Image (cartoon, rainbow, N blue to C red):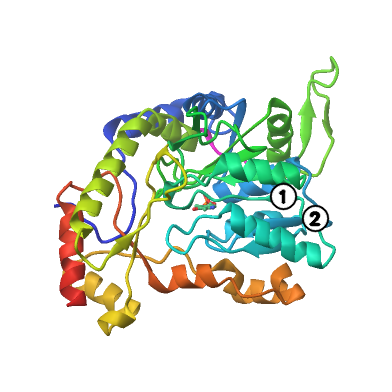
Amino acid sequence: MADINSYGKQDINQDDINEVIKALKSPALTGGSYVESFATALKNAVNAPSASVCANGTVALHLLYQALGITQDDIVIVPTITFMATANGARYLGANIYFADVDPLSGLLTVESIQNAINDLDQHNLKAKAVVPVHMGGQACDMPKIRDLATKHNLLVIEDACHALGTTYEDSQGKSHKVGACSHSDGVVFSFHPVKTITSGEGGGITSSVDIIQTVKALTGHGIIRNVNDQPWYHEMQMLGYNYRITDIQSALGLSQMQRLDQFVKKRQELINQYIKACENTPIKFAVNPDVVHTTSWHLFVSHIDFNKHHTTRTNVMNTLRNTHEIGSQVHYIPVHSQPYWRKNSLNSKLNSSELTHALEYYQSCLSLPLFPLMDLTDPKRVIDALQDILK
Ligand SMILES: *Cc1c(COP(=O)(O)O)cnc(C)c1O
């Protein structure tokens, strides 16, 4: 029995600790070789054209949006079921955000919901510049179809893969693609927060073309370009950038964790299989996206429960899980468009667009249950038994 009082947490072993100690004793605590090695490890893990690492997933989004040319004149389509950073990263650049609906069970952005967003914008003579599929819970969106639609409408595709390091999907020819390879997008963003597949404490990653990653790297350090000429001291600030650097200490941890990526993914899949088995013949539903054949690096186990039907509330279920069974749970996510800031500032509200009903349906019933590599394979049944007991 593992300690499952939270929905997710890191798995740090002695190798990880040893690598961090080595980094602490190395010449550079930041801007050193661990940072480069971590970026290379990310590139290799996902077959990316090029990769860079930075302070966290939120700034990774900001950097990629900026490098791809998103400005205050642009509209970005973002699913409303995501972590708020997906929208905020583009908003930092002044972009307008149009929130799109999602599949009511998987929470994934769909081709239909993007088409609806495009149609609604079209009615106001507006055109989006980019769409941002979020691989919710680790399940891949239907990237080949999304890319086709985006190409038709001249949209950039930016993948928020903060949940999906280690996920692979197949296209209609049966060819397999790693999330992060940019097979059907212009760039991909990852997070290495402790609840994510691997961690560097805080950390983020970006994969894209060699050119875009070069810009991302410059923006990560104040837009400074070195080696402009043969004067050793000379450097130029060619664009307005930031200090969004990750440290070598964090990169050493990330690099060490990356070596266990396959192990982490495998364990998460085994736990999901236990959850699915335990949920059979119970009122607890669970969504596997039927549109895409894929190997999922499960980040979340999002169950769906009709709380009303069981004469209870989610609050009551969560409190009882915690207080009686010491089981943590969480809601992923409150629809971002309904947050007070976005209720005032989203393009949906400015255009008085229709409500995102499938997302609200998803939000009513979702409950994320513990899922992380340190769990025992018997834990999922323990969680579902406790839940059934509460729902009785
Ligand atoms: C975690 C996460 C982010 C942001 O990552 P941080 O590293 O926490 O800044 C962005 N999008 C999604 C979907 C996430 O889950």
In this orientation, which residue lies closer to the viewer: 157 or 13?
Answer: 157
User: Does residue 156 appear left or right of residue 184 in this picture?
Assistant: right
Q: Secondary structure at mark 1?
A: strand
> Which mark sits nearer the N-terminus, 1 or 2?
2
In this orientation, which residue lies closer to the viewer: 155 or 113?
Answer: 113
245 within the magenta span: yes
Q: Identify the amino acid type marked 2.
A: Asp
Label 1, residues with CA under 10 Å away: few <14, some 14-19, many ≥20: many
Q: Magenta stretch?
A: 244-248
Q: Identify the amino acid type marked 1.
A: Ala
Question: Where does residue 372 sit, x and y in percent of width and height?
Answer: 30, 48
Label 2, residues with CA under 10 Å away: few <14, some 14-19, many ≥20: some
Instruction: Determine whether 62 is above or below 187 in the image.
Output: below
240 within the magenta span: no
Q: Most extreme residue toward the top, as rendered?
A: 230
Name which quarter of the figure residue 40 lies in. Answer: top right
User: Label 1 to label 2, Cα distance in Å?
Assistant: 8 Å
Instruction: Determine whether 346 is above or below 35 in the image.
Output: below
User: Does residue 325 appear left or right of residue 219 in this picture?
Assistant: left
Q: Which residue is mark 2?
A: 74
Q: Which residue is mark 1?
A: 130
Question: Where does residue 380 sit, x and y in percent of width and height?
Answer: 20, 54
Question: Where does residue 42 sit, x and y in percent of width and height?
Answer: 51, 30
Residue displayed at 83% across by 25% down: 234
Task: Note whether ligand 1 is within 8 Å of mark 2.
Answer: no
Q: Secondary structure at mark 2?
A: loop
Name which quarter of the figure residue 244 lies in. Answer: top right
Instruction: Determine whether 54 is above or below 262 in the image.
Output: below
- Would residue 88 be visible to someone looking at this image? no
Name which quarter of the figure residue 152 lies in. Answer: top right
